Image (tube, helix red, strand yellow):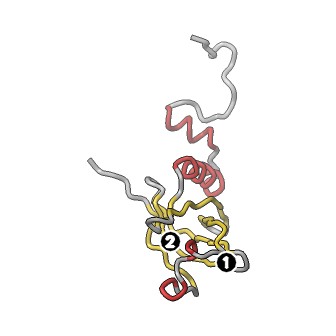
Amino acid sequence: MCTLDLKVPIKITDELTDSVVTAHALLNLASGAIENVQYVDYDAQALGEPFERDDYEFSSGTLSNDGKDVEFRVDVNKTTGNYSVSPSELLEIKVRAAALFAGVTGRQLLDKATGGSSSGAAPSAKTRRLH
């Protein structure tokens, strides 16, 4: 059995009270794990991880393609130091990215996954069934 290991490059932004720390990383679209975090112009060894600082507020991520961006919430496990995206946020990222980058609607994705029609139109009275 083959597992899909699709990782896309993202930008992480750690918001501090008076500054912002950015990093480049990879988002695993199957699991929501964020890997290979590389801070930009920030020395984590000397200053500590941004999320460990007293002035840390929150983290967000950006997935970019051809000048278009999808922004999303990033969770940080302060015990392990791992960044990740929740399952519900990951689904939202996939739907928004498909709509923005490929012009595909959430309804079309659902229809394709379930084998339904992707026209987006409501079924006619003749084809609707309640049972």
* Crowding at mark 2 (Cα within 10 Å: few <14, some 14-19, many 20+): many
Q: Which amino acid, mark 1? A: Val
Q: Quadrant of the C terminus?
A: top right
Drawn side of residue 3 relative to residue 106, left or right: left
Q: Residue furthest front?
A: 54
Q: Residue at x 56, y 41 (%)?
A: 109
Please give the residue where the numbered disc 1 appears in the rendered image. 20
Q: From the top left corner, tell me how far across and down residue 59 is, in percent.
A: 62, 66
Please give the residue where the numbered disc 2 appears in the rendered image. 25
Q: Residue at x 73, y 79 (%)?
A: 18
Q: Is residue 113 above or below residue 88?
A: above
What mark, if any, has residue 82 been given in the picture? none
Q: Residue furthest top?
A: 131
Q: From the top left corner, tell me how far across and down residue 79 is, in percent.
A: 46, 65
Q: Classify residue 62 by image quadrant.
A: bottom right
For discs 2 and 1, the disc positioned in front in the rendered view: 1
Drawn side of residue 74 relative to residue 20, left or right: left
- Secondary element at tag 1: strand
Q: From the top left corner, tell me how far across and down residue 43 is, in percent.
A: 53, 87
Q: Which amino acid, mark 2? A: Ala
* Crowding at mark 1 (Cα within 10 Å: few <14, some 14-19, many 20+): few
Q: Residue at x 69, y 26 (%)?
A: 122
Front residue of 86/6: it is 86
Q: Residue at x 26, y 47 (%)?
A: 1
- Secondary element at tag 2: strand
Front residue of 103/72: it is 72
Drawn side of residue 16 relative to residue 90, left or right: right
